[in-house]
Image: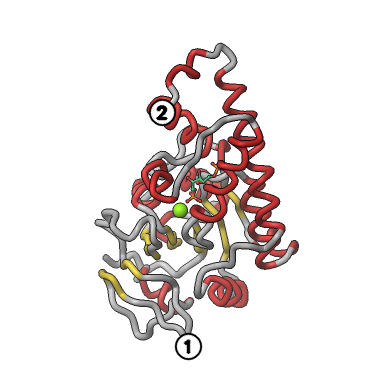
Amino acid sequence: MNFGNTLQAVLFDVDGTLADTEQDGHRVAFNQAFKENGLNWQWSIELYGELLQITGGKERIRYYMERYSPGLLNRNDLKDWIAHLHKTKTGFYEMLMEKGSIPLRPGVVRLIHELRDKKIMLAIATTTTLENVTSLLKSTLGEESIDWFDVIGAGDIVPMKKPAPDIYHWVLNQLKLDARQCIAIEDSENGLKSAMAANLLTLITVNGYTHLQDFSGALAILSDLGEPEKPFTQISGETFKQQWIDYEILNGLLK
Ligand code: XBP
Ligand code: MG
């Protein structure tokens, strides 16, 4: 594949890619919100892994209700009720991030700084709520880091969440770039499908919840972005000059 493009922007997914937020962040916040709202629901680590196939917190709650608490689906204020429950969850999630409980994954900070130095645009394309993105960035990179991102596409800003390509289309449109001038970094099958459907070349860094998923079509599948002193493990796909992802590697992927 030779598109002759040079890298203009890197589009990062958030949950599972920038940080391992699902098990000890989102899951915990959902459970706190259930308790706060008088529900005896408890999402275990294992159950949450299954529920993750549904992207979006409100959509995930509804999916859970259909399977485990269908009686509650008859409420005539169902949509508002789920929205309220989810808002409570977002509040708990923000509190968890304020405590600084979740670090960024290996290589993320180094790569973000290098891309900024090289004047490569940074963007976020996520199904999670905007407040969750800003609270994670604030707690890990500092308040000013929110402005490092030229575009943040999050949550309900588009009608269809991943695996639909809508969020990536929206971000590319905001960036005024063609997909072939960008690289997407994702951690999940739903994320990969979404990015590929928007024509983006995509690098995968897996985590405990996603490592067994189908990543057909990804450029490469890695344990993480790697650091010079803590190289990534290659799982499959293209091999590189070194075991940490940098600007040169990402730019080379477009050639
Ligand atoms: C991951 C998601 C989100 C989070 C929960 O998004 O599917 O739904 O699990 O966040 P991504 P909300 O990997 O695209 O960052 O409750 O705010 O939806
Ligand atoms: Mg993800």
- Residue 68, labelled with which disc? 2
Which quadrant is home to the C terminus? bottom left
x 66%, y 35%: residue? 36
CA distance for labels 1 and 2: 46 Å
Mark 2: few, some, or many residues within 10 Å (few <14, many ≥20)?
few
Q: Is residue 164 left or right of residue 155?
A: left
Residue 14 drawn above or below residue 69: below
Spot occupied by residue 185 in the image (x, y as percentages of width and height): 44, 61
Which label's residue is closer to the chain start, 1 or 2? 2
Which secondary structure lies at badge 1? loop
Type of amino acid at the residue the image marks with label 1:
Glu
Spot occupied by residue 231 in the image (x, y as percentages of width and height): 41, 82
Which color scheme is applied? secondary structure
Residue 85 drawn above or below residue 255: above
Q: Residue furthest right?
A: 143
Ligand 1 within 8 angstroms of badge 2 C-beta: no
Q: Residue furthest front?
A: 40
Q: Nearer the viewer, residue 116 or 22?
A: 22
- Residue 229, labelled with which disc? 1
Residue 102 drawn above or below residue 86: below
Mark 1: few, some, or many residues within 10 Å (few <14, many ≥20)?
few
x 56%, y 69%: residue? 120
